[in-house]
Image: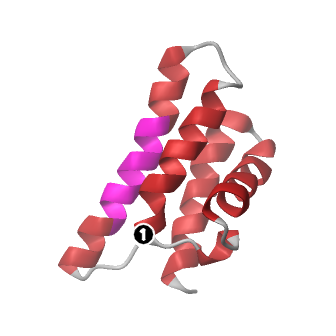
Amino acid sequence: MPKSLKIYDQAVRISEEYLGPAGERFLRRQISTHLGIEPESISEKDMYKLVDWASLAFALLTSDPREVESFTNNLLLLSTKQKAQRLHGTAA
């Protein structure tokens, strides 16, 4: 499985924690619309831009700022985790 697919799968899991089955569709739309790439081709370098857009869009879906912060932080942690694994040469 390509490394980029693992990043995508992990981001989908995070989105589904907050949005249920709609999480994957939400994420696919953010990636294809705002990043202009196929969702499965997302890479580590795309994650910060994705987090910005997904966080903004998620904030439009809820009035709970704690949920927005939690969602954003979990996606950011994924970005940080991927970077740390790359630097240490460990698998995702």
Left or right: where 80 falls relative to 46: left
Residue 18 percent coordinates (x, y): 64, 34
**Is 47 placed left or right of 29 in the picture?**
left
Q: Position of residue 75 (x, y in %)?
A: 47, 47
Q: Quadrant of residue 39?
A: bottom right
Which residue is the extreme one toward the top?
63
The quarter of the rendered structure image containing the C terminus is bottom left
Give residue 24's position: percent from left, percent from top: 74, 53
Crowdedness near tag 1: few (<14), some (14–19) or many (≥20) residues, C-alpha within 10 Å: some
Name the image colouring: secondary structure
The residue under the point 58% across, 14% down is 64
In the image, residue 37 sits, relative to residue 34, either above or below, namely: below
Q: Amino acid at mark 1?
A: Glu
90 lies above or below 11: below
- As for residue 74 lying within the magenta part, the answer is yes
Where 47 falls versus 73 (above or below)?
Answer: below
Compared across the picture, whether 41 is left or right of 92 comes to right
Q: Quadrant of residue 1?
A: bottom right
In the rendered structure, the answer to whether residue 12 lies left or right of residue 81 reads right
Residue on which disc 1 sits:
44
Relative to 69, residue 25 above or below: below
Q: Residue at x 74, y 47 (%)?
A: 26
Q: Secondary structure at mark 1?
A: helix
Magenta-drawn segment:
72-82
The image shows a total of numbered marks equal to 1
Q: Residue at x 57, y 44 (%)?
A: 53
Picture residue at 72% right of the left edge, 36% below the top: 19
Residue occupying the far bottom of the picture: 1
Magenta span dominant secondary structure: helix
Give coordinates of residue 9: x percent, y percent: 61, 65
Query: Can you tell which quarter of the image residue 15 is in?
Result: top right
Residue 87 lies in the magenta stretch: no
